[in-house]
Amino acid sequence: MAITVVAADNRVTRFESQIFSEYVRGNQFAQDMANSTNAIHHVNERLTGEKGEEVSIPLVTRLTGSGVTGNNELEGNEEQMDNYAKKLTTDVRRNAVATTEKEKQVTVIDLLQARREVLLNWLLDQTRDSIIDSLRKIINGAVNVTYETASAANRNGWHVANIDRLLYGNAAANYVVGDHAASLGNITAAMTLSKAIVRLARRIARTNADPHIRPARVKNSETGAIEEWFKLYVPTFAFRDLQDEMDPTYQGAGVRGKGNPIFNPGDLIVDNVIVREVPEMPTIAGVGAAGIDVAQCALCGAQATGIAYAMRSKSITDVRDYGFVHGAGIMEYVAYDKMSFNNKDHGMLTLFVAGVADA
């Protein structure tokens, strides 16, 4: 009797491991994701081997003291390291496709392979959208909502708490105390994303923000040097405006840092800020001066967002109707959120600029 052996590529365990690594690696934020307090998107998988649905990610700030020199004693002069915690509560996310024996008979499509591709693409989209939502979250006290669902009071509370982590247009003076909407109204059509605005946002992150926003430290694979970088995620129209300004003296990732693993083709560089276009990031319609659209951008340093897995992606199946209907899907236990403490966005500055669509 001949026994059919399932090929290695079709075994469920290999499928699950492969699809998890591919969708994590394949999303556009992948280069900034790692299980490290130095990563822009801090990934925690502690619960994958334990029971529970909530994980606590430590938030650490930089040391600011001068230490001791010479023969001065260090004992008794230690510096306190400020540290906080961000709790992430994971939840199940799943999706599936189903087909019948009849459809399997009449098609030459490899349904197993097709299932894998559509589920992989779904996971990629979900990861991307969840990180974008996290970057744009309104978090203040018990309030933790997406920007679009936040009330005016929610936005104003976040606006007040993050006064040192917000930039409206091209000047700090555009900030209106206690009024997020009025601050957006100060953004004119001329306040498009520019090198000057990127540099201003960077200065605020490094000097005005309290505590300062730590840049991510990355080892250059070509030179071996440790480099400090911020990542600025921007919608398409904001990226277009900066690209137009930089075209005459274009600075691309291929020139200044092609050996650095945090670059993508097409990224722009302003000083130590990598500007990345994220087409799926939305603009906010009609909130600027004279009713112009505004682009919300995220200048990120270390630990801007947190991602927690209680269970990696897992295959799920269902057979019903006397074996006639076959369903197959994927599920995982995961949480995404902006990292925050004391009502402040921990690792990021939010930048609002004109985001007018093409004429």
Image (cartoon, rainbow, N blue to C red):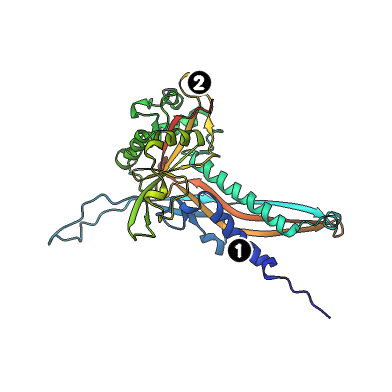
Query: Do the numbered discs 1 and 2 sit on residues whose CB atoms are within 8 Å?
Result: no
| The one of 148 and 10 positioned closer to us in this rendering | 10
Instruction: Tell me: residue 74, above or below residue 144.
Output: below
Residue at the limit of the structure toward the front, as seen here:
248
Residue at the (36%, 37%) spot, across then down: 201
Question: Could you say whether the residue bearing mark 1 is in a helix, strand or loop?
Answer: helix
Q: Decide which of 90, 93 is in the foreground and name it.
A: 93
- What amino acid type should be assigned to the residue bearing mark 2? Gly
Left or right of residue 151: residue 343: left
From the top left corner, tell me how far across and down residue 85 is, in percent: 43, 51
Give the percent coordinates (x, y) of residue 71. Answer: 12, 62
Residue at mark 2? 291
Q: Please report whichever mark, 1 or 2, sits nearer to the chain's N-terminal start.
A: 1
**Residue receiving disc 1:** 17
How far across and how far down the image is residue 90, in percent?
Answer: 57, 52
Callout 1: few (<14), some (14-19), or many (20+) C-alpha neighbours within 10 Å? some
Residue at image coords 43%, 52% = 262
Residue 342: where, in percent of width, then height? 40, 42
Give SS at disc 2.
Answer: helix
Residue at image x 53%, y 28%? 358
Q: Residues under labels 1 and 2: Cα distance?
A: 48 Å
Callout 2 crowding tier (Cα within 10 Å): few <14, some 14–19, many ≥20: few
